[in-house]
Image: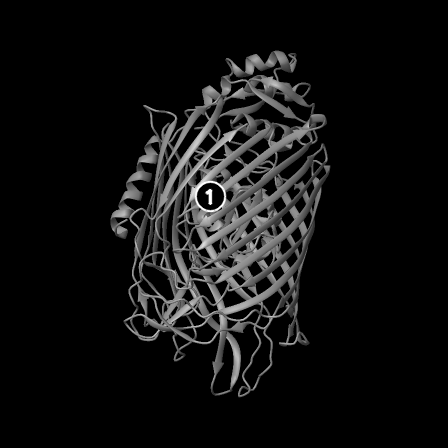
Amino acid sequence: MLSKHASVVAASAPKARLIPLALAIHLAFAGALALGGHAAAQTQAAAVVQYDIPAGPLAAALNRFAQRSGVAVALDADKVQGLRSEALKGGFGVEEGFNALLRGSAFVIGKTDAGYVLVAAPKGQPTSAAADAASGETVLRTIQVTAAASPDELPAAYAGGHLARGSALGVLGNTDIMDAPFHTTSFTAKLIEDQQASTVAAVLLNDPSIRATTSEGHIYENFSIRGFEISNEDLAFNGMYGVAPQGHVPTEFLERVEVLKGPGALLGGMAPQGSVGAVVNLVPKRAGDKPLRRVAADFSGESQLGVHLDVGQRFGQGQRFGVRVNAAYRDGKVGVDGQNKERSLASVALDYRGEKLRMSLDAYKDGEHITNGSSWMATFAGPGVNAPPKAGTNLLRGIFGKLDTQAALLHADYEFSDSLNAYAGLGAMRYRYAGYINGTRARIKNAAGDYDGQTYNQRGSSDTVSAEVGLRARFSSGPVKHQMTLGANAIRLDGGRATVMNSPLYKSNIYQPVTPLLAATPGAPLQSGDATLSSVALADTLAFAGDKVLLTLGARHQRVQSATFDGKGVKGLEYDKSALTPALGLVLKPWDAPVSLYANAIEGLSQGSKVNDPQSNNNGFEFPPYKAKQVEAGVKWDLGRFAHTVSAFQIKKPGVVYDEQSKLYGIGGGQRNRGLEWSAFGQVGAQLQLQGGLAYTEGKLTFGEGKPNNGNTAFGTPKWKANLGAEWQVAALPALALNARAIYTGAQFVNAKNTQQIGSWTRYDLGARYAARAMGRDVVLRANVENLFDKSYWAGSFNDGFVTQGAARVFKLAAATDF
């Protein structure tokens, strides 16, 4: 639902220590406060743009027109409720197009310092004549304008184009950053292209609160967000769990990578693996209003070559039907020394946008095959930590692994009226894997780097079916406006894994590795998992005082049903537990300035564990789902072309503790993370774009007085992390853009005992983009280098006691052209 002052703003075109890096970020963003503005408005107003907007609700048509034209519009949604517009097709200026949509209504478009606004047509004048008066001599009060997308409309890109004005909040739908009671970030396809970020992990590295917990050359991607692990299996695709690609998630078919920091059980239900640090949602590409024919070739690593085809087209009456096809293939040496990676992606996105009905079908096939090596992790026998070997060292020459994911997702939305719509989704995924894809580790015995190695060969499968259905209603009760959602979802997961085959032990050294012994090939997979996650949620966002107060209340009832299987695939004990997770969110806009104060109290869920201790008095007991609880408060400041978010949070995730006196296991203690975060992004003047921020996290283990490790710092939780990224459009050569990025991660403990610690590290990246003309075609050339100084460092930790190594320097080149 559009807020009282709803608007849409489209995108404008175009390592040392912590203290100096933080100072650089502070000075850069302080300059942004002085320089940020609204310089592009007059140029946009004068431009003639081609539009093809179908007939439908007036508010939705105005919203879409504002996005397409790249301007802001403010209106009282109550006044246009129930009104409809005719279709708009052809070339129009901004004011001409707005008034064409408003023809026959009681409104015309007016102009303010902040953008465009609907005003009542002067009495006795038709709307076409009143338009000139409203846009000419009429003086209007300057009003606060904030962007607000409808629950099903993709939020527009922010100034600079690398981040978006909003993101999906599960059952709450797409929400503008200034209206969201959470700290959210949404990275766009433009950022992905400009940085040549080929996987989701490479995209998320732009956020100071996020670090990868598996190395670049590994076959899986996992993350730490706000100090809590996020499994690759817990990524959402188009708002639904269980259907995202496995392993390295490719980006060629993604329009957005959205992050909602903190747990989100109310918003989307329990993640399959129970991650609580954040909700990461992948938004697939759709066909745009303008036909697209694009091909790109790229080179990276030692010798990896790739090609990417991206084709989009709309057709039919009112261009209601759309198709977007992405196909990508890469093969060659990349990752650790001598490692080869073959990656393939084929995807198709079909959509229909009618007057009342919207539908989409996304289908993809993603495959990855690694040979002759993998990145690895290490653990240490003594209290110290060995120095890392040269970046890119390959301990596992000769191993291989293969992942294959296929999925399809159908989604539909039907608008019964301006105040009621229904949505539904159904998806399925088939995942198969084989080879040496886990257990790539070295247990180091001494300061010389010696270790006893072992390889693990496995074969497995996973089949998932995911579904959702819901109703959204928009209505008023006196002066209070409501946006209420009732939704339900379910995920069915079936897994199979053969007995993992282990190789004999062999001796090696991390500084002078030998060729490892390989394990035998396992047999066919047997059933190893069976789980169903189902839930029902009810949420209501109440708007008071002219949308200056937004209160979100809701709760989700989650049920977890699962079964265990023995090594022969025979079904064993069953688990059936449920939990209720309430949530509260509040947004206050107390001033005319574009500032939002927000707070939330929300929970996350993880499946409860089973006691497996014959000496305990409750052996075999299965705990209900664990509830992680977050409280957060912050402030957001949107300067029109530059935005800030500052937040403070606390997340408590319980664990299981043992009482020696009663000999009982019970839920208690766990991990408590407290933190402060600052993120900022946008355009500074006409040439400079900045993004980044700081994150301070204090993670503590809270198992109770006298318990082992109680009060210790949570492993894998550095206190300080910082990012600063910049892109500069060269004034003397407008076709050239230069970019740079610094990524800082502070020292961190790598085990719960706090006896082992790795030092801080800073990585620098550089890049350039050049728009050229060749053989009558526009060509964009890109060059990037990551880890510019080829620094060797331990990047972070994975599980208790294991460290991962940072990737070696890698050069990336790409050329793209439309045809």
Amino acid type at image mark 1:
Leu
Count of marks, rendered view: 1
The spot of residue 337 in percent (x, y) is: 38, 55
Q: Quadrant of residue 67?
A: top right
Viewer-proximal residue among 732 and 677: 732
Quadrant placement of the C terminus: top right
Residue 691 is left or right of residue 569, and the answer is left
**Kind of element beneath mark 1:** strand
Residue 162 is left or right of residue 350, and the answer is left
Residue 586 is left or right of residue 56, and the answer is left
Viewer-proximal residue among 418 and 151: 151
Look at mark 1 in the image and give the residue it sits on.
305
Residue sitting at x 35%, y 66%: 513
Residue sitting at x 55%, y 39%: 545
Viewer-proximal residue among 424 and 796: 796
In the depicted structure, whether residue 396 falls above or below residue 181: below
Viewer-proximal residue among 321 and 338: 338
The spot of residue 336 in percent (x, y) is: 40, 56
In the depicted structure, whether residue 660 falls above or below residue 387: below
Quadrant placement of the N terminus: top right
Mark 1 neighbour class, 10 Å CA radius: few under 14, some 14 to 19, many 20 or more: some
The spot of residue 338 in percent (x, y) is: 41, 55
Residue 401 is left or right of residue 430, and the answer is left
